[in-house]
Amino acid sequence: MSAISLPRLPAIASSAIAMEVLNGLTECPKTLSPWLFYDQAGSRLFEAITELPEYYVTRTERQILAKHAAEIVAAAAGGRDLSIIELGAGTATKTGLLLDAAVAHQGTVIYYPIDVSETALEEARTRLESEMPEVTVEPIVADYTEGMRQNNAAGIDRAGRRLVLYIGSSIGNFSPADALEVLRGVRAQLSPGDSLLLGTDMVKDTEMLLAAYDDAAGVTAKFNKNVLVRINRELDANFNPYLFRHQARWNEQHSRIEMHLESVLAQKVAVRPLDLELRFSRGETIHTENSYKFTDERVLGLLTRAGFKLRQQWSDDQQWFTVYLAVAN
Ligand code: AVI
């Protein structure tokens, strides 16, 4: 019997990426969500960004953690056994410092990395379990909310304390309202006395910020344009990445770096499966990312409104980056 052929949209037309393109690129100003950066090529490019001379963020936070990990662990544990959860763990490269400190503090530790990327979590588990036999890795493949819910529902660590790591200033890629929502969601799955370690990039010299998001080697430009390459591949679109220019802007009013892709000429782009023709005027941009930069005041406001109380904070000598330890009320 032959299959009945009914007219229907191809499956990709209802995918998350199709929704992004339909919603974000048909409105004015044009926008795309930053999760689109992180396909395999984009995740590799982000790893390369973290090693750039201009991108002080990762290096500076690592220095702070290297210096204060023992203090952080002792303060979070408060005399009990500590388990460590990490939001958006990826390959968990900075976490080793805190896991080392937890092992020194209590002998063994259970580590729950939460991430949507199963391959990144498997890489983290293989590496950590071979390098640190005292660490038991229990990966949770989920988004933050669902991952925290699963960890809480399992209820295995009730006798001890939990420490949630949300480092790398990833909170800065959310709008203030969404950032509050995320932290409230985390708080809802914790018990009083559990804690959150939040790493945030601070407001600083504008030239330095712009250089960190528009490096001389062009890695960030490639990372930004990778969204167009991804849309071409996954949605059969015909963006020409050479006809878009990477742009980093400082938005003083909102205290954020913005990344845009600027159309260098008037052009049309076709997204055939969506039956869509996108028009760009010369100089029009697609806004692809916000990276908010913080002050102590803003972070404290956020923590308080989310139901946490600041216990202690650590910065580098130049005050470029701050790590906050906050306890659930
Ligand atoms: C992942 N996130 C904290 C990075 C940031 O600095 O906002 C993403 C990034 N975008 C450009 N360079 C790095």
Image: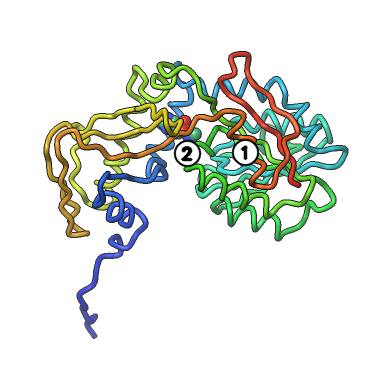
Amino acid at dot 2: Asn
Q: Is residue 296 left or right of residue 329?
A: left
Taking depth in this image into account, of 63 and 188 the one nearest to the observer is 188
Q: Residue furthest right?
A: 79
Q: Is residue 308 left or right of residue 231?
A: right
Q: Which mark is residue 301?
A: 1
Q: Which mark is residue 318?
A: none
Q: Is residue 261 left or right of residue 198?
A: left
Residue that label 2 marks: 173
Q: Cα distance, mark 1 to mark 2?
A: 17 Å
- Where is the N terminus found, in terms of image quarters? bottom left
Q: Which corner quadrant of the image does residue 133 belong to?
A: top right
Q: Which corner quadrant of the image does residue 124 belong to?
A: top right
Which residue is at a point 76% across and 57% down the rendered structure image? Answer: 155
Residue 17 seen in render: yes
Secondary element at tag 2? helix
Which residue is at a point 78% across and 49% down the rendered structure image? Answer: 192
- Expressed as whole percent of the image width and height from the top left, the position of residue 152 reads 70, 56
Which residue is at a point 70% across and 20% down the rendered structure image? Answer: 67
- Expressed as whole percent of the image width and height from the top left, the position of residue 244 reads 21, 33
How is the protein colored in the picture? rainbow
Residue 46 seen in render: no
Q: Is residue 243 above or below residue 137?
A: above
Taking depth in this image into account, of 226 and 172 the one nearest to the observer is 172
**Quarter for ligand 1?**
top left
Distance from mark 2 CB to nearest ligand 1 atom below 8 Å: yes
